[in-house]
Amino acid sequence: MYDLHLTPEQLEFRDTVRDFVENEIKPVALHPDRLQPFEKPLLTELVDKASQMGLRTFALSEDAGGAGADDLTSCIVLEELAAGEVDIATVLGHTSFLGHVLFDQLLSAEQRARFLPKFAEDDRYHLAFAGREPNAGAGWSYHRALAEGGAELSAKRQTEGNWVINGSLPFVANAPIAKLLVVQARSDPKKTGANGMSMLLVPSDAKGLTIGNPPKATGEAVRWHQGTGASVTFKDCRVPGDHLVGKEGQSPLADGTLLARSVTQMAAINLGLGRAAYDAAVDYAKIRRQGGRNIIEHQAIGSKLADCAIKLELARNMIWKAAWAADHPDAVSDRSLPELPLHTMARVYTARAVNEVTLLSAECFGAMGVMRDMPLQKYVHDGRNTCTTDSYSRTRMRLTMPPNSQSRRRSRATSGRLLPNGLTGDERW
Amino acid sequence: MEARRFSDEEIRPLSVKRDQIEGGFEPWDWDIIEKGSKLGFRTLAVPKEWGGQGADFVSQAVVMAELARGDSAMSKAFSQNWKWSHLIAAACTEDQKERFLKPFLADHRYVMGRGITEPNSGSDNRLPPEDDPKAGFRLRAERKGDEWILNGEKCFIANGSVGSLFFVDARTNPDVNIKQGGTLFMVPKTTPGFRIGKVFNKRGWRFYQNAELIFEDARVPHANVVGTVGGASATGKGDNTGGDLFGDLELAANALGVCDDAVDLAMQFSRSHKRAGKYLFEHQLIQLKLAEMHALTEALRSYVMRVAWIHDRREPSANAGLVMIYSTDVIQRVTALNMEIHGAEGCLMNARVDKLVRDAMVWTHLAGDNVQRMRTLRKLAGKPVPVVSGD
């Protein structure tokens, strides 16, 4: 049964994070000194503080030392965090999600025993996924043979069992702060797409691994992502044979199913951003007086704010539904829920809705909406960011694409209906 | 064509670099202003008999759009002077023209601005509420012999930190609404008791300087009153086709230049970048966006030129307001589509594409906000029926 009652734990989670955001994050993140410059380096002290509260490991199972948050709870936590600062939410969400996938699902008992204690104890132990998302570009190849392209890593097993990784990726989320990289590399060059990929664990201090500097916010091309990230380059980077996760040539992340759950969580981060903009606009409209009354009492402002509230609530409904569906896979098998990529629908709808909400909210501020010492212009910037990424169009296109089309030369006659499972995780956080 | 050359060769290369200067507003780029001024772009709208170019509205629109194609804010820094050239020509006495127009023409660094907005009066100045006569600007002016003593503060004032002359709206009678109690003064920057406050750090139009103007017992001679005391709003409009209406055309023409730039960028990008083995230009998804960008931009061009032409014929209409509103919607949409077409390349965005979106945001509160929309409608509907109080 679809139940919208939150558990006492979920409510407590939400209130705790909300307090942390109000008392700790907002005073720093919304300070004019922080808002004005183009460059906004990651607020690492706050990320560390959040880690100490358990927000780096909230999705990790309680057995493993985490809080065991399911998808819905994760979305609630991330919405709250993002209402304070999108980058902090993105970084923590990424580590928390990957930690859960790795330590609760993919690692062998022996690997878990080796890596988990460090991950659980060290507040600065972050994780990154370094691999080309297998369906990257799939939207552009809509109902056509998938065009290969984009950077890909290669991994070779040596006779003594070690792996040697080569290649580089232009952007890996969390790379600058990660202590462990989850690498997905092509181990069988004869195969294409998701086949022939292997997954390897690479500590960030491994020899032959170079992590670049995060992109700059000024220059000819400017930083355009949330969280933190950088290029990674592997040059004859060696890791022991037992760093292989799963089977050779069958990376458990290759088909994107596991990563798909992170898509809903990214949508929750966007939602938090939109809510922050809306809340600010409501507060301002209640005290700003023009036209003989507080501006919230004017039809023109009232209708804008109502539109914002509607869009945000619809986005939240979709996010919660998608997260709940991921937490209850039987709801699809018992035909309660349609077999649709709800997570992608949530992501696409939220991105667009939040972009609109940030613009409408900024309009309520008049000229103050474009002033750099005020938060609205940053919300608008962040809102644009999420809905104009290259992956956005492609992600949407995948709604009407056949599943696993990347491995087929010809698609079946399937156009005209929404296809299940044709979607995977987004390319990046 | 001179405007196009200047825009391509002088303005454009500075555009993104200038936009990205952190906080720093000093020194202003006087070089580009001087260069443009020598070509006549600062004084374009001053009548020929006073030594300006005396360009008609159609020419002004074309030049604004061309300059804005290089940099929207730099175009505005030039055309802001035209706005007040129109006002001087329409509303100032011969003595005032002698005292202010002459130095303006003589000095390549002489720029002007107007101070209306205050921290507590933005929309109230443009659309004064009928039920609140005290609403609107509060900067107080009190007569003392041959002088007026001004006290108060203006904010967001264009060319604020760099201007030599400001037109300042002040309350000469605080007991009636601004239409009857407001007076327009000419305030040179050397006025005793007048100083510049903070310069605003904006998301878009970063070349263009908006600042606080602070008046502490500032002494302005009575001879600097524009029009009549208590006639600020009537004076401000100048003649019905220039003055105030120029501002509306100005924003629309500037938006047109930005849209032209966005269309060029999108066309170039989609013809030079491939996705899935095909140029972006060959993808339906991109074709639909490009077609919309072209359609909106050309429609805006037609409307801008029509309004400029109407102005040249001195025909009063609400079209200037309408084209300004329309330009707000078009510039938002076209710059956003350009950004969608460019997409993020990995984790990066073309800086100029981002800049256009940021510049476009300025329109949402300046040109096409709620108040401008409602104000334009009033023009269309005719003058509002005066409300006669029952008691």
Image (spheres, helix red, strand yellow):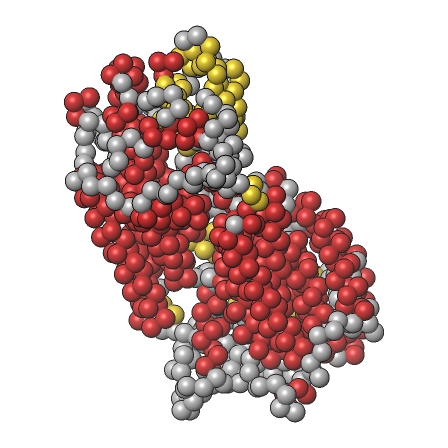
Q: Is residue B120 visible?
A: yes
Task: Looking at this view, name the residue that lies furthest to the top.
Answer: B145
Quarter the C terminus of chain A occupies: bottom right
- Image position of A425 (left or right of A111): left
Of residues A28 and B54, the one nearer the viewer is B54
Q: Quadrant of residue A201?
A: bottom right
- Image position of A343 (left or right of B351): right
Q: Is residue B191 above or below residue B62?
A: above
Q: Position of residue A364 (x, y in %)?
A: 52, 49
Q: Position of residue B38 (x, y in %)?
A: 24, 27
Q: Is residue A236 visible?
A: no
User: How many callouts does the rendering have?
Assistant: 0
Q: Is residue A418 above or below residue B309?
A: below
Of residues A323 and A301, the one nearer the viewer is A301
Quarter the N terminus of chain A occupies: bottom right
Residue occupying image coordinates x 41% and y 74%: A140
- Image position of A343 (left or right of B206): right
Q: Is residue A350 above or below residue B92?
A: below
Q: Position of residue A268 (x, y in %)?
A: 62, 65
Residue occupying image coordinates x 27% and y 47%: B319
Q: Position of residue B338 (x, y in %)?
A: 37, 58
Of residues B186 and B295, the one nearer the viewer is B186
Residue occupying image coordinates x 40% and y 24%: B230
Residue occupying image coordinates x 66% and y 86%: A331
